[in-house]
Image (cartoon, coloured by chain):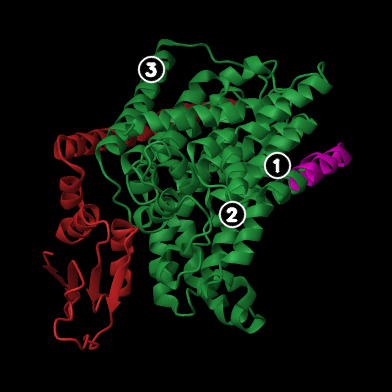
Chain colours: A green, B red
C-alpha cells in the first residue's frame, strides 16, 4: 500500500509531463515554462483527463499503465514536430509592457507588500492543514463528485451500470468527468479509492489559480498592486471554507482556475495570434467544458466576448482574429467531442436532457421568476461575510468605468464575459425544472446554495476588472493596450 | 480640479485598503482558528473515528460495516430520498437496498439477509439495527 500523498505526487508528475510536452509541441519557450508552472499544470490536467477518457472509451482499464500512457500522445507529438520542423520561433504567454510607470517602493509600500505576502502564505498553509486533516464534509463532494471518483476507481472503466442506474441518478452521472477521473488517477497506485490523497486537489487548483492571477497582474502594473489584489482574491472567505470551496472535493475551484487561465490565453491571443497559442486556448476551453457542465457555456460566452470586444475596441486585425478563433473552436470541439458523444449516447436520464423539453410556453411561463432571480444575483456580492469588500469595489469600479466611458479591449472583454455569465445564471434559474418539480420556493432554495458556488468561478475576473478600473489605474492607456504582455 | 481629485483620492485609497486589511485579518484569524480546531479534532484519529465525529453514527456505521463486510447488505426502510446521498458514497461499492413505506417483507425472518437495517420514523429520524452474522 503506497502512501496516498506519494500517489498525489506521482499524479502531479504525470500532469506536468503532459503539460510540458504539449506546450513544447506548440513551440512554447522552455525557459518561460519554468516561470509559469500554473500553465503547465492546467494544460497537463486538462489534456491528461481528455486523453485518459478516450482510452477508457476505447475499452482500456484505468491502471498505472494507462495513466502513464496518457502522456504518450503529447510526448510523441513533441518528438515528431521537433523532428519535422527543428527551427521554429518560440512563443510565450505574457510579456511585460515596455513602461510600467512604477511607483517608488516607499517604506509603506514595502511593508504593505510584506503584509500581503504573509496573508497569502497563511491562507494557503491554513487551507493545506484543513484538507490534510479533515475528511470530506460537503454534500456534493461526497454524493456527486466523490461517488463518481469511487465508481471509476473501483470499476476502472466506463462500462459501468452507474451511468444508467436510476438508483444513482441523484449523483448526476451526466456531470463531466475530469475531476473524478483525476481523483481516480491519483488513487490508481493505491489500488482503491483513497479520500485523503484526493482531498488536496481543490487546494492545489486554488494555489495555481493565485499564481496565475498574480502573474497576470504582475505583467500589468507595479508588483505591489499585484500582491495587494492577489491577497484580496486569496482572502475571499468563500474560497477557503464551505461547500464548493478549495477545502472540498468539488469542481468549482478547478473551474474557476480554468476560466481564469482561458481568460489569460484570450488576452494573450489578442496581442499575438500564433497557431500554437490558438491550439492551447482550444484545449483550455475544452478543459472548462470537461470540468463542469456550465464550463461549456462559459467557453461559448468567452468566445463571444472576445469577438464582441474586438468589434467594439479594435477592428483592425479582425480577419486574423477570426482565423485564429476558427482554430480555437476546431481544437476545442475535437477535444470535447468524445465526452459529449459519450454523454449523448450512454446516459439516459430524463432530467439530463432538460433542454430538449423546453417549449416557448414553458419559457414564457417562467419569465416572472426573474423578479426574484435578478435582485438575488445582483445583491449576492454585497454579502461581506462571503466576499469581503471585493464586490463593493467592483461595483464602484463599474461606476468609474461608466463615468470615463472610454473602455479598452481588455475591459470590454471582461465586462462582456461577466455580463454573459450573469445572463446565463439568470436564464438557468429562470428555467430550472428539476424533474419538473421545481416551483418558485424550491427555486429560491436552490439559488441559496448554488449562487455562491457559481459566483466563486467569476471572482478572479471580477477582481481583475476592478484592478483595471479607473479606481486603480491612473491613466487611460492601462485599459486598452497596456494589455498584460 | 486635479488637486481637488488628489485630495480625495489618497484618503479614499487608504480607507479602502484599511477596510480590506481589517477583513483580511478577520479572515486570517478565522482560517487559522478553523485549521487549529481541525488539527486538534482529527489528529491521531482513525478514518472511522473521523467519520463518526463529522457525520454522526449513521454514516460511520454504514461505512464501518461496508469496510468490514465485503458483501455487506444494508436495508433502508422508509428512507427519505435525500438521506441516501451521503450513505451511497459510504456504502459504495455495496448497494443500499430500499424498502418502501408499509411494504414489509413477508417471510418469517424478513431482515435476516441484511447486515444493517436503517429505519426512518415519521419525523425522519433513523434508528439502526445491526445484525451480527
Q: Which residues are magenta?
A: A311-329
State which tag comes first along the sequence, 1 or 2.
Answer: 1
Which residue position holds label 1? A282
Which residue position holds label 2? A421
CA distance for labels 1 and 2 = 19 Å
What chain does badge 2 belong to?
A
Q: Which dot, 2 or 3, sits closer to the camera?
A: 2
| Residue A40 position (above or below residue A136) | above
What chain does badge 3 belong to?
A
Position of residue A123 measured from the top left corner of the image (x, y, whole percent): 34, 31
As helix, strand or loop, the secondary structure at mark 2 comes to helix
Q: Is residue A258 magenta?
A: no
The main secondary structure of the magenta stretch is: helix
The reply, left or right, for residue A172 in relation to residue A402 is left
Task: Please identify the quarter of the rendering in which residue A109 is found.
Answer: top left
Position of residue A197 measured from the top left corner of the image (x, y, whole percent): 35, 37
Q: Exactly how many numbered labels are in the figure?
A: 3
Amino acid at each position: 500500500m503506497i502512501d496516498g500523498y506519494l500517489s498525489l505526487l506521482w499524479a502531479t508528475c504525470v500532469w506536468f509531463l503532459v503539460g510540458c510536452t504539449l506546450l513544447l509541441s506548440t513551440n512554447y519557450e522552455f525557459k518561460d515554462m519554468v516561470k509559469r508552472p500554473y500553465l503547465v499544470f492546467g494544460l497537463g490536467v486538462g489534456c491528461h483527463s481528455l486523453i485518459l477518457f478516450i482510452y477508457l472509451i476505447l475499452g482500456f482499464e484505468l491502471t498505472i499503465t494507462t495513466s502513464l500512457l496518457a502522456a504518450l500522445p503529447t510526448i510523441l507529438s513533441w518528438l515528431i514536430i521537433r523532428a519535422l520542423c527543428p527551427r521554429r520561433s518560440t512563443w510565450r504567454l505574457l510579456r511585460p509592457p515596455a513602461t510600467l510607470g512604477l511607483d517608488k517602493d516607499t517604506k509603506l509600500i514595502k511593508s504593505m507588500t510584506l503584509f500581503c505576502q504573509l496573508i497569502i502564505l497563511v491562507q494557503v498553509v491554513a487551507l493545506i492543514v484543513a484538507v490534510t486533516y479533515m475528511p470530506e464534509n460537503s454534500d456534493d463532494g461526497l454524493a456527486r463528485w466523490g461517488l463518481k471518483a469511487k465508481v471509476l476507481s473501483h470499476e476502472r472503466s466506463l462500462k459501468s451500470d452507474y451511468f444508467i442506474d436510476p438508483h444513482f441518478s441523484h449523483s448526476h452521472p451526466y456531470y463531466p468527468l475530469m475531476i473524478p477521473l483525476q481523483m481516480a488517477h491519483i488513487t490508481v497506485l493505491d489500488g482503491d479509492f483513497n479520500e485523503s490523497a484526493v482531498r488536496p486537489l481543490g487546494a492545489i487548483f486554488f494555489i495555481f489559480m493565485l499564481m496565475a492571477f498574480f502573474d497576470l497582474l504582475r505583467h500589468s502594473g507595479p508588483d505591489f498592486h499585484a500582491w495587494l489584489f492577489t491577497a484580496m482574491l486569496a482572502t475571499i472567505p468563500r474560497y477557503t471554507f464551505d461547500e464548493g470551496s478549495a477545502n472540498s472535493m468539488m469542481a468549482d475551484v478547478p473551474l474557476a482556475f480554468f476560466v481564469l487561465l482561458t481568460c489569460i490565453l484570450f488576452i494573450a491571443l489578442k496581442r499575438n495570434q500564433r497557431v500554437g497559442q490558438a491550439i492551447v486556448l482550444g484545449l483550455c476551453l475544452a478543459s472548462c467544458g470537461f470540468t463542469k457542465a456550465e464550463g461549456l457555456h462559459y467557453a461559448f460566452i468567452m468566445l463571444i466576448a472576445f469577438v464582441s470586444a474586438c468589434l467594439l475596441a479594435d477592428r483592425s486585425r479582425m480577419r486574423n482574429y477570426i482565423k485564429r478563433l476558427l482554430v480555437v473552436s476546431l481544437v476545442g470541439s475535437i477535444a470535447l467531442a468524445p465526452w459529449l458523444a459519450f454523454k449523448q449516447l450512454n446516459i439516459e436520464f430524463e432530467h439530463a436532457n432538460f433542454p430538449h423539453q423546453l417549449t416557448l410556453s414553458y419559457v414564457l411561463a417562467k419569465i416572472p421568476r426573474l423578479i426574484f432571480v435578478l435582485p438575488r444575483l445582483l445583491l449576492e456580492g454585497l454579502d461581506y461575510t462571503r466576499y469581503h469588500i471585493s464586490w463593493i469595489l467592483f461595483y464602484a469600479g463599474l461606476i468609474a468605468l461608466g463615468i470615463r466611458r472610454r473602455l479598452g479591449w481588455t475591459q470590454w472583454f471582461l465586462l462582456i464575459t461577466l455580463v454573459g455569465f450573469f445572463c446565463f445564471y439568470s436564464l438557468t434559474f429562470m428555467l430550472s425544472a428539476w424533474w419538473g418539480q421545481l416551483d418558485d420556493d424550491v427555486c429560491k432554495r436552490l439559488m441559496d446554495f448554488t449562487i455562491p458556488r457559481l459566483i466563486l468561478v467569476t471572482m478572479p475576473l471580477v477582481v481583475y476588472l476592478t484592478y483595471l478600473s479607473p479606481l486603480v489605474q491612473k491613466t487611460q492607456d492601462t485599459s486598452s493596450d497596456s494589455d498584460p504582455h | 480640479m486635479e488637486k481637488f481629485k488628489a485630495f480625495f483620492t489618497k484618503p479614499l485609497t487608504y480607507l479602502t485598503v484599511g477596510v480590506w486589511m481589517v477583513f483580511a485579518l478577520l479572515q486570517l484569524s478565522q482560517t487559522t482558528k478553523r485549521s487549529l480546531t481541525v488539527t486538534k479534532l482529527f489528529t491521531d484519529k482513525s478514518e472511522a473515528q473521523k467519520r463518526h465525529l463529522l457525520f454522526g453514527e449513521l454514516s460511520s456505521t454504514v461505512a464501518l460495516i461496508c469496510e468490514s463486510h465485503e458483501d455487506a447488505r444494508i436495508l433502508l426502510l422508509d428512507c427519505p430520498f435525500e438521506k441516501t446521498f451521503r450513505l451511497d458514497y459510504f456504502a459504495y461499492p455495496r448497494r443500499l437496498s430500499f424498502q418502501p413505506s408499509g411494504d414489509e417483507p413477508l417471510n418469517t425472518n424478513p431482515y435476516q439477509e441484511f447486515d444493517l437495517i436503517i429505519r426512518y420514523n415519521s419525523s425522519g429520524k433513523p434508528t439502526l439495527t445491526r445484525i451480527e452474522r
